[in-house]
Image: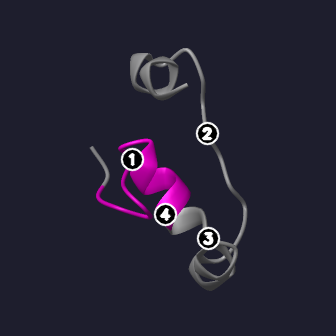
Amino acid sequence: MKRQIRAGNIMFFVMRTKYELQDAGYEEFLDTLGLAFLGACR
């Protein structure tokens, strides 16, 4: 999944607030994929 996201084959969108995502544990999930958590734009 990580390679497909980075290659642009999968798009990942989340429509929740930063705090909802942190409470649900998404920060750790996205970190394991090697993605920035609400991080800098390219």
Residue denoted by label 4: 28
Which residue is painted at 35% across and 61% down in the image?
Answer: 39
Q: Are marks 2 and 1 in contact (CB under 8 Å)?
A: yes
Whether residue 31 is situated above or below residue 17 in the rendered picture: above
Q: CA distance from mark 2 to mark 3?
A: 16 Å
Per the rendered image, the range of residues in magenta is 28-40
SS at badge 1: loop
Closer to the N terminus: mark 1 or mark 3?
3
Quadrant of the image for the N terminus?
top right
Disc 1 target residue: 35
- The quadrant of the rendering that contains the C terminus is top left
**How far apart are labels 4 and 2 at the CA level?**
15 Å
Task: Report whether 40 appears left or right of 27.
Answer: left
User: 10 Å neighbourhood of mark 1: few (<14), some, or many (≥20)?
Assistant: some
In the image shown, does 2 or 36 lie closer to the viewer?
Answer: 2
Image marks 4 and 3: residues in contact by CB distance under 8 Å? yes
Which residue position holds label 3? 25
Nearest to N terminus: mark 2 or mark 1: 2
User: Label 1 vs label 3: CA separation?
Assistant: 14 Å
Q: Is residue 2 left or right of residue 17?
A: left
Q: Which residue is disc 2 drawn over?
A: 12
Q: CA distance from mark 4 to mark 3?
A: 6 Å
- Residue 4 x %, y %: 50, 18
Tell us which disc is closer to us: 1 or 4.
4
Residue drawn at x 55%, y 14% is 9
Sort mark 3 into few (<14), some (14-19) or many (20+) by Cα contacts within 10 Å: few
Three-letter code, disc 4: Glu
| Mark pair 1, 4: CA separation | 10 Å
